[in-house]
């Protein structure tokens, strides 16, 4: 019996669309009958279905069971058909990495399987670029774009363990750090006081000069505080202490956490909160509803540990309740009645 294209195609479509690979006979019969609704009651109907199944099996579009069959009528029909498993593409073996002589240390880490996928991808990009050096030094973001396809990625790697003597250097990559100017008031070099917002930075700078603060008051510029600290670390003597003062809100806590982590990477003294200024903000500030997302539990836990109790609870409670206190409350008039002892827990190291 010759196969009937309409029946064969209907069965093939039902098998293809089935959610399971093993398609029961009932589904097959319904599909076949959908193109010939009167044939199911006609003599020879099962033979026509069997012929269609045999055709699909010969074409490799279904697999028929060897023994499982419905023998309730003649001829017997398979109790199910199986959709063949999709072909698995053979993975092309990864070509061996031929490491540049300047990356012998990376080759050793690779051989010892000590590189994460991200680290390997970064080092391979550098490895591929090194033979293309042209003895032309360019700013770090230009080099990052050329080597990594992302103008900012190299800055992150620069702060990690891959950049150290005997490993990667800016000279090797023919680049140089190109940080934006740091707005700061230099009154000495003993300590750094980093302020989140520009207006408060100006007011605190003026009062700090009047009070004889022996350090630098730095505008952190919000989320740019990481680049500000990186720039300062290359242009100023290392401070004896590094203090931070920002808004009491989710964003302010995030920025403070960023400042702390970036200082650690840069091997600066730990960034600690200017607790006295935060207490002044809690005392003089008026909490307002915040439109930003509330802090995560992890951020709250970090903040409470960073501020230390009981200040940690006092700072995080309004933020967790969806309120914020902006540091501009600590303006010229409030500052005029303060001393350095009101700003810090350890003023004797700052005067």
Image (cartoon, rainbow, N blue to C red):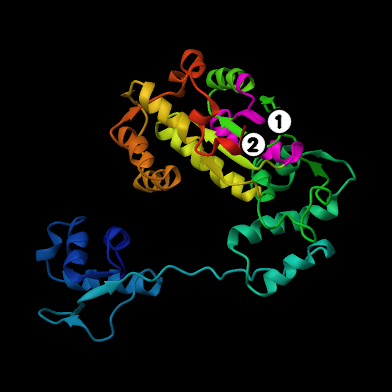
Does residue 320 appear to the left or right of 170 in the view shown? left
Viewer-nearest residue: 290 or 87: 290
Viewer-nearest residue: 166 or 12: 166
Query: Could you say which quadrant of the image residue 55 lies in?
Result: bottom left
Which numbered marker is on residue 259? none
Does residue 304 appear to the left or right of 181 in the view shown? left
Residue 347, horizontal then vertical, whole percent: 55, 35
Q: Does the magenta stretch include residue 3?
A: no
Q: Tell me the residue at 56%/71% (across/down).
A: 90
Q: What element carries label 2?
A: strand
Residue that protrudes farthest toward the bottom in the picture:
67
Q: Name the residue under label 2.
A: 191
Q: Mark 1 points at which residue?
A: 188
Residue that protrudes farthest toward the top in the picture:
333
- Provide the residue span drawn in magenta: 210-237
Residue 97, horizontal then vertical, whole percent: 73, 67
Residue 313, horizontal then vertical, whole percent: 33, 40
């Amino acid at each position: 019996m010759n196969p009937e294209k309409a029946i064969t195609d209907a069965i093939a479509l039902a098998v293809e669309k089935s959610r399971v690979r093993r398609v029961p006979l009932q589904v097959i019969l319904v599909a076949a009958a959908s193109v010939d609704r009167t044939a199911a009651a006609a003599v020879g109907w099962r033979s026509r279905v069997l012929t269609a199944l045999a055709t699909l099996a010969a074409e490799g579009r279904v697999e028929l069971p060897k023994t499982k069959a419905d023998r309730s009528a003649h001829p017997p029909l398979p109790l199910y058909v199986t959709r063949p498993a999709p072909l698995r593409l053979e993975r092309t073996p990864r070509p061996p990495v031929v490491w540049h002589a300047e990356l012998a240390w990376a080759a050793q880490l690779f051989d010892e399987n000590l590189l994460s996928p991200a680290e390997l991808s970064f080092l391979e990009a550098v490895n591929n670029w090194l033979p293309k050096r042209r003895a032309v030094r360019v700013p770090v973001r230009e080099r990052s774009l050329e080597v990594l396809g992302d103008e900012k990625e190299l800055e992150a790697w620069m702060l990690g363990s891959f950049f150290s003597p005997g490993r990667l250097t800016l000279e090797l990559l023919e680049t140089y750090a190109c940080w934006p100017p740091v707005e700061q008031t230099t009154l000495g070099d003993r300590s750094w006081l980093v302020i989140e917002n520009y207006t408060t930075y100006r007011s605190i700078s003026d009062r700090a000069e009047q009070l004889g603060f022996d350090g630098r008051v730095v505008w952190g510029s919000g989320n740019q505080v990481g680049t500000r600290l990186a720039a300062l670390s290359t242009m100023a003597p290392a401070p004896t202490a590094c203090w931070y003062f920002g808004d009491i809100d989710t964003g302010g806590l995030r920025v403070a956490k960023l400042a702390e982590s970036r200082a650690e990477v840069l091997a600066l003294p730990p960034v600690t909160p200017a607790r006295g200024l935060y207490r002044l903000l809690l005392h003089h500030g008026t909490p307002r509803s915040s439109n930003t997302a509330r802090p995560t539990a992890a951020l709250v836990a970090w903040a409470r540990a960073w501020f230390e109790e009981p200040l940690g609870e006092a700072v995080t409670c309004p933020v967790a309740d969806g309120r914020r206190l902006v540091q501009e409350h600590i303006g010229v008039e409030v500052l005029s009645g303060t001393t350095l002892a009101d700003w810090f827990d350890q003023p004797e190291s700052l005067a």
